[in-house]
């Protein structure tokens, strides 16, 4: 009987010594957890499987560190690539217009124009005409000024749409510009219309609308039957259209 009890105790101790979870009592399990919480480290139980688990955990830890290092390397490479791309962009040719290039695009027959058409420039829908008078008499045929969005007046015949040969006129004297603008109707509503405007280009002797000199570099709206003069020239340009009443 004693021998039988001893053999049972020995077997029980052997089971506890193996540390297999299936043979460990609740008390030994609790103690193991308490020890881990107290020291922060798992105490080895001497089981061969535990060694394998330990080695596996160690291997995973190394893999985790390696992965983190790899991630850091990836981030470093990405940053380096971004910096290289940014540096490359700095040396890319710029196709935006520089001041000199913009000036070249505003040249006609090698001459730089003194004006640039505005974004609202449009061709007119109304068939406007300029009738030229001198001394109260009509000269030649009317000038049809509805086929373009702008017309340049001046002595420089290479670029002027309407030459003004009088010596008091400047080479680029003034410009007739059609613009899309909002106008108030008789009923109070707003509507978009293409209207004629005149601008003096800093001429020496000025531009006149109905004998009133206009300020340079400003748009002045023209209306039917307005009279325009340039410099000291006696020629008068009267603005009419095909449906104008006599």
Image (cartoon, rainbow, N blue to C red):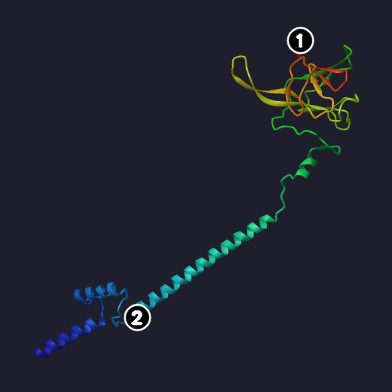
State the residue at coordinates (80%, 34%): 114
Q: Is residue 234 left or right of residue 56?
A: right
The residue that appears at 82% across and 24% down in the rendered structure is 206
Going from the N terminus, do you reach mark 1 or mark 2 first? Answer: 2
Mark 1 vs mark 2, foreground winner is: 1
Q: Write down the quadrant of residue 209 in the picture.
A: top right
Whether residue 140 is situated above or below residue 152 in the rendered picture: above
Relative horizontal placement of residue 219, taking residue 231 as reference (left or right): left
Position in image of residue 176 (x %, y %): 78, 25
On the rendered image, what quadrant is the C terminus found in?
top right
Counting from the top left corner in percent of width and height, residue 91 is at 70, 56
Instruction: Give the crowd class for mark 1: few <14, some 14-19, many >=20 residues within 10 Å.
Output: few
The answer to whether residue 9 is above or below residue 97 is below
User: In which quarter of the view is residue 99 placed?
Assistant: top right
Camera-side residue of 245 and 207? 207
Element type where label 2 sits in the image: helix
The answer to the question of whether label 1 and label 2 lie on touching residues, with beta carbons closer than 8 A, is no
Q: Position of residue 81 (x, y in %)?
A: 60, 61
Please give the label number shown on residue 145.
none
Task: Please name the residue that numbered disc 1 is placed on.
Answer: 245
**Residue 51's mark?**
2
Q: Report the label total.
A: 2
Residue that protrudes farthest toward the top in the picture: 246
The span from disc 1 to disc 2 (Cα, nearest Å) is 111 Å
205 in relation to 56, above or below: above
At horizontal 26% and vertical 82% (from top left) the residue drawn is 18
Graded by Cα atoms within 10 Å as few (under 14), some (14 to 19) or many (20 or more), the crowding at tag 2 reads few
């Amino acid at each position: 009987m004693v021998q039988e009890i001893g053999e049972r105790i020995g077997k029980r101790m052997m089971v506890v010594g193996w540390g297999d979870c299936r043979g460990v009592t609740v008390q030994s399990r609790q103690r193991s957890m308490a020890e881990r919480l107290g020291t922060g480290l798992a105490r080895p139980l001497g089981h061969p499987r535990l060694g394998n688990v330990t080695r596996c955990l160690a291997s995973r830890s190394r893999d985790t560190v390696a992965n983190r290092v790899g991630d850091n390397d990836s981030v470093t490479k990405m940053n380096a690539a971004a910096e290289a791309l940014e540096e490359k962009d700095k040396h890319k040719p710029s196709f935006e217009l520089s001041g000199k290039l913009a000036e070249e695009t505003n040249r006609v027959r090698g001459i730089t124009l003194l004006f640039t058409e505005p974004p609202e420039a449009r061709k007119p829908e109304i068939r406007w005409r300029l009738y030229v008078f001198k001394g109260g008499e009509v000269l030649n045929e009317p000038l049809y000024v509805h086929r373009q969005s702008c017309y340049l007046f001046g002595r420089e015949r290479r670029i002027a749409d309407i030459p003004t040969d009088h010596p008091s006129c400047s080479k680029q004297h003034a410009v007739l510009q059609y613009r899309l603008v909002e106008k108030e109707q008789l009923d109070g509503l707003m509507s978009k219309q293409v209207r004629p405007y005149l601008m003096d280009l800093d001429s020496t002797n000025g531009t006149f609308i109905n004998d009133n000199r206009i300020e340079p570099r400003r748009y002045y709206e023209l209306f039917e039957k307005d009279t325009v003069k340039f410099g000291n020239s006696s020629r008068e340009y009267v603005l009419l259209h095909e449906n104008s009443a006599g």
